[in-house]
Structures are given as C-alpha cells and as structure tokens.
Amino acid sequence: MHGYFPYFETRSITFMRILRSGLRSSAAALVAAAALATAPVAQAHDSVVGGNVVSDAPLEEFPKEITLEFSAIPREGFNTFAVTDTNSGDVIFDAEPTVDGRELTVETPEGVNPGPGHYQVGFQITSSDGHATRGSVPFDVAGQAADSSEESTTGDPVADAAQNASTPWKWIIAVGAVLAVIAVLILFAAKSRRND
C-alpha cells in the first residue's frame, strides 16, 4: 500500500501547478480588464469656443483680421480659413491661419472690405488628436452704408410734404395765367369789331 503514495503525491503536485497557472492567467485578465475600464476616453475633435467674430451682435466694420479660439491646441499645417458672403455664396478670401496656442488667426488682405452684410468663416484644421476637423462660424457686419442708402431712398419727409403742398398752387397759377390771356384776347377782338 505504501508504494502508491508517490503516485498520489505526483498527481497532487501537478494539480497545484495547474491551479497556480490558472490563477496567474485569471489575474492577468483582470488587470487587463481594469486597465481598459480606467483608460481615458478619447477626446472629441477640437471645437470653436471663442474668437473676435463670435458675437451675438453685428460687428461695426469688417474685421482687419479674423481669430478663432479652439477647445484645444490644433496642430500646425493643413489649416485653412475661407470667408464667404452667405447671401451670394462668393468666397471673399481664403488663407492659412497662424497658430498661437489655441488661437488661429488670418489677416484680411489689403483692399478687401466688402462692407455690411452676412458672412461666415469656414475652417478646416488638424485637431489636437490628429484628425481633420471642418466647421464654420457666421458673423454679421453692420455699418453706416445701409443707413445712408435707406436715407437716400426715403428722402426728407418735410421737404416732400412741402413740395407736394406747393404743386396744386402751381397748377392754379398756370390756369389763371391762361384764362387771363384768353380774356385779354376776347376784349381785344370785341374792341376791334366796335371800331369797324
């Protein structure tokens, strides 16, 4: 009977090795799962959070430069701004912006001043995560041109009223002058007949 003990002892050692190996594999799997569970969520593409054209109120004049501030620092290269007239769809100008931290800026070309209107600045940038991001920001420009044109169209109400009021008197004077001439001619003709 004692000859069987080594056999059982060997089987016991083998079982313990298998058990320890299984425990190590399970522990490794748990660590991997925990790492995945606690890994940071990938950030979304950079979005516009500010800028000199981001405003609820119209701008007083067309900006000399356009700056957009993003939620993270975009990467250099492959960045483009394009400013368009939203009414006509015409592209006013496009340029590659300079990157200064989270702010991207383009200068309006010299001589470009479309005046009052509705515009948008479209952008294509390389986000901080390396992906291309596209979008647009609308903005309005007010100014005096629209007011001046409106004034020239409507005119001066007081002057218009005075001119309209003087028009009937002009007709009355003209008709009176014609009647006076006719009366003089009739009197002259009657006098000529009496002399004959």
Image (cartoon, rainbow, N blue to C red):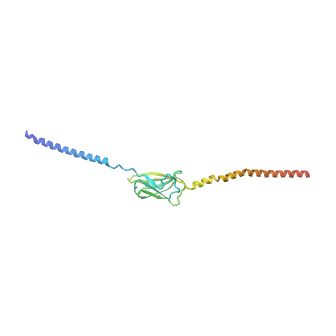
Residue at 13 percent across and 43 percent down: it is: 10
Residue farthest to the right, as pictured: 196
| Residue that appears at 81% across and 52% down | 180
Left or right placement of residue 159 versus residue 74 in this view: right
Q: Residue at x 31, y 48 (%)?
A: 38
In the image, residue 140 lies at what x, y percent?
Answer: 52, 53
Image quarter where the N terminus lies is top left
Q: Residue at image x 69%, y 52%?
A: 162
Residue that sits furthest to the top in the current view: 1
Counting from the top left corner in percent of width and height, residue 177 is at: 79, 52
Nearer to the camera, 23 or 109: 23
Q: Does the image show residue 32?
A: yes
Nearer to me, 184 or 87:
184
Count how many numbered circles sit on residues in the image. Answer: 0
Outermost residue on the left side: it is 2
Left or right: 195, with 107 as reference point: right
Residue 96 seen in the current view: no
Residue 14 rendering spot, x and y as whole percentages? 16, 43
Position of residue 31 relative to residue 113, above or below, is above
State the image quarter where residue 104 is shown: bottom left
Question: Residue 71: x percent and y percent?
Answer: 41, 53
Q: Residue furthest front?
A: 158
Taking depth in this image into account, of 4 and 190 the one nearest to the observer is 190
